[in-house]
Every structure is written in C-alpha cells, then in structure tokens.
Image: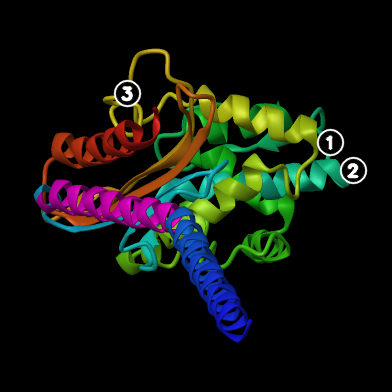
C-alpha cells in the first residue's frame, strides 16, 4: 500500500508539473502573439516614417535648382499624413496674403457688418500698378463688394485688395481674425500700394508666413472655421477659378484636377526674385484633400524653373498620397 500510494503521489505530482509547464508555455505564447499583433502597427509606422523621409528628401532634391530658399508643407487633411521642408521658416507672401484678407472680409459679411451687394467706389487715386479693374486714365466707378472679392482672389487684383483691406479695418483686423482661428506665424502688415510703390524693398518681407502656418489656415478654411457655409463655398469657388499660376501647383497634375489656390509673386530686382509662391487645396483621386504650401524665396533661377519647382513638389506629394 505504501509503494502504491508513493507511486500515485509521484504520478500526481508529475501530472501537475506537466500541466503547469504547458500552461506557462501557452501563456508565453499568448504574450508573444499579443506582441506580434502590436508589432504590426509599429512596422507600419516605421514604414510611414521611411516614406515620409523619402518624400522630404525628394522635395529637398527638387528644391536645389531654385537657387534660393524653398519652404514646403503638405498635409492630407483627412488623415494627417504630412511632410515639411523648412516649414517653420518665414517667407514673404506677396499676393498669397489676399487669401487671409478674403477670409477676414467674408467673416465681416457673416457678422452682417458688411454686405456682398454693397457698393464700393474706387477712385483713380486708389489704383495700384497693373490693376485689372480700373485703368489709371479712366474715371472712378463703383463695384459690388462681391466683385472686388472675386477680382482680388481669382485675378489677384491689388487695387481690389487695398480697397477691401481698408474696408475691413486694416491689417490689424486681419491679424485679429487669424488669431481668433488659432493661426499664428502669418503676418499681414502692409498694403499692396505700400509694397509696390514704397522705397523700402524690405517691406514685402513683413507680409510673411511659414509654410506650416499657411497649411494651418488652409485647414481652418477647409473645416469651415471662422466662415459660414456660403462664404466658404464662395471663396472656394473663387480660388478654384484662379487664373494666375497655372504652371505652379496645377502644372504637372492630371488635367481636370480641382485645385483651390492662391498665388503670390514679387518683382525681380538685380536678378533676384523675392517670392514665387502658391498655396491651396488639391482634391485627390481618392476623394481626400491635400493642403499644400510652397514658397520659393530670394531665387536667382528663371521664372520657368521657379514655377517648375512648385509643380514638381506638388506632383511628388500627389504621387505619394493619391492612391
């Protein structure tokens, strides 16, 4: 009986030991499976980082021919996928600043401080160089507020811009509006007349923005922050109808691609062009939207090359995120 009991006890102990061992193995395998499951997103994240770095390197390579300073930020608004190159540096906006001015004016319309059908008289003395709405030798005339907005955005008319900037209360009111949206690092400081006819050529650098900030403003616009639905729709249409800069963001994209954008260009002085810019929202084939800002500053390259840099950067981001 003692031998039998001893044998039974021994067999029982062996069984328990094997059971515990198997349980321990299964438990470890369970953690391993769990770790293997969580490792997939890590691998994907690493892959995304690698692709992002490759895209940034591609943008840097494209930028080298600009013979100047280039800043780029691009973001897929629905997913947050993004790339930036000198995105936190300030660049002169030139007429890109008409985009935030238009938003500030439309916000005043939404608040019923202004009306789209109100008439605004433009005198000959108000004309800024190369105005599209009034010749210097013509008589003054009245325009609807909506007409001036369209001229300012779609045709980048500087006379319309200065009239609207005065109407809204000057640069400070535009800055207050941007602050209300939480958009920093965009500076609206001077009128078109001051920049074009002033003796100080550095004034154009005061109206500046970082590519990051420009994309933040595009996001705010896309999300409808600070504007009514009708004002957002009107501005989007005017930006889509923009006649300037067809060889910039739109330059290498497939025909028919919807691009709501605003360009900016400075004069060339002593072989140096202070600003060749384009910012906008591109509708991708998959239905998502790409907010992109490309600034080319202090460039000694030709206009064709400067615009080509913007077009190639836009195409690189399109190829990355259009699938």
Please give the label number shown on residue 115: 1
> Which disc is residue 112 wearing?
2
The reply to whether residue 322 is visible in this rendering is yes
Q: Taking 130 as reference, is 171 above or below it?
A: below
Q: Badges 1 and 3: C-beta atoms under 8 Å apart?
A: no
Residue 133 can be seen, yes or no:
no
Which residue sits at x=54%, y=77%?
7
- Judging from the image, what secondary structure is the residue with disc 3 in? loop
Residue sitting at x 71%, y 46%: 105
Q: In the current view of this chain or complex, which residue is farthest to the bottom?
A: 2
Mark 1 closeness class: few <14, some 14–19, many ≥20 residues within 10 Å = some
Mark 3 → mark 2, Cα distance in angstroms? 39 Å
SS for callout 2 = loop
Residue, x 18% and y 38% (percent of image)?
303
Give the Cα distance between marks 1 and 3.
37 Å
Side of 43 relative to 68 (left or right): right
* Magenta residues (range): 39-64
Front residue of 124/187: it is 187
- What count of labels does the image hold? 3
Q: For mark 3, what is the residue?
A: 253
Q: CA distance from mark 2 to mark 1?
A: 7 Å
Earlier along the polypeptide chain: callout 1 or callout 3? 1
> Which residue is rendered at x = 34% and y = 25% of the image?
246
Pointers 2 and 1 in contact (CB under 8 A)? yes
Q: Label 3: few (<14), some or many (≥20) within 10 Å? A: many
- Where residue 189 appears, x then y in whole percent? 53, 65
* Apparent side of residue 261 relative to residue 226 in the rendered image (left or right): left
Residue 38 is inside the magenta segment: no
> Most prominent secondary structure in the magenta stretch?
helix
Helix or strand or loop: what does disc 1 sit on? loop
Name the colour scheme: rainbow
Q: Magenta stretch: residue 62 in it?
A: yes
């Amino acid at each position: 009986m003692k031998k039998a009991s001893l044998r039974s006890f021994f067999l029982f102990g062996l069984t328990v030991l094997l059971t515990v061992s198997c349980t321990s193995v299964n438990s470890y395998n369970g953690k391993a499976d769990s770790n293997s499951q969580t490792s997939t997103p890590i691998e994907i994240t690493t892959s995304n980082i690698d692709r992002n770095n490759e895209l940034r390197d591609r943008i840097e390579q494209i930028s080298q021919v600009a013979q100047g300073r280039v800043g780029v930020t691009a973001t897929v608004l629905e997913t947050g996928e993004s790339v930036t190159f000198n995105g936190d540096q300030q660049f002169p906006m030139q007429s890109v600043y008409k985009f935030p001015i238009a938003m500030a004016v439309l916000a005043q319309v939404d608040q019923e401080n202004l009306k789209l059908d109100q008439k605004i008289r433009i005198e000959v003395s108000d004309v800024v160089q190369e105005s599209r709405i009034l010749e210097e030798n013509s008589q003054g005339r009245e325009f609807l507020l909506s007409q001036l907005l369209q001229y300012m955005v779609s045709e980048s008319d500087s006379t319309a811009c200065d009239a609207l900037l005065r109407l809204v209360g000057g640069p400070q009111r535009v800055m207050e509006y941007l602050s209300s949206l939480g958009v920093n690092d965009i500076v609206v400081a001077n009128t078109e007349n001051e920049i074009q006819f002033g003796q100080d050529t550095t004034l154009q650098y005061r109206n500046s923005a970082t590519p990051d900030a420009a994309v933040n403003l595009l996001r705010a616009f896309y999300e409808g922050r600070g504007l009514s639905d009708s004002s957002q729709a009107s501005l989007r249409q005017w930006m889509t109808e923009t006649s300037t800069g067809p060889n910039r963001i739109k330059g290498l994209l497939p025909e028919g691609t919807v691009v709501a954008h605003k360009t900016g260009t400075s004069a060339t002085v002593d072989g140096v062009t202070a600003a060749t810019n384009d910012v906008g929202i591109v509708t991708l084939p998959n239905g998502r939207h790409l907010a992109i800002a490309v600034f080319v500053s202090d460039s000694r390259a030709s206009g064709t090359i400067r615009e080509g840099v913007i077009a190639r950067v836009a195409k690189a981001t399109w190829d990355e995120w259009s699938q």
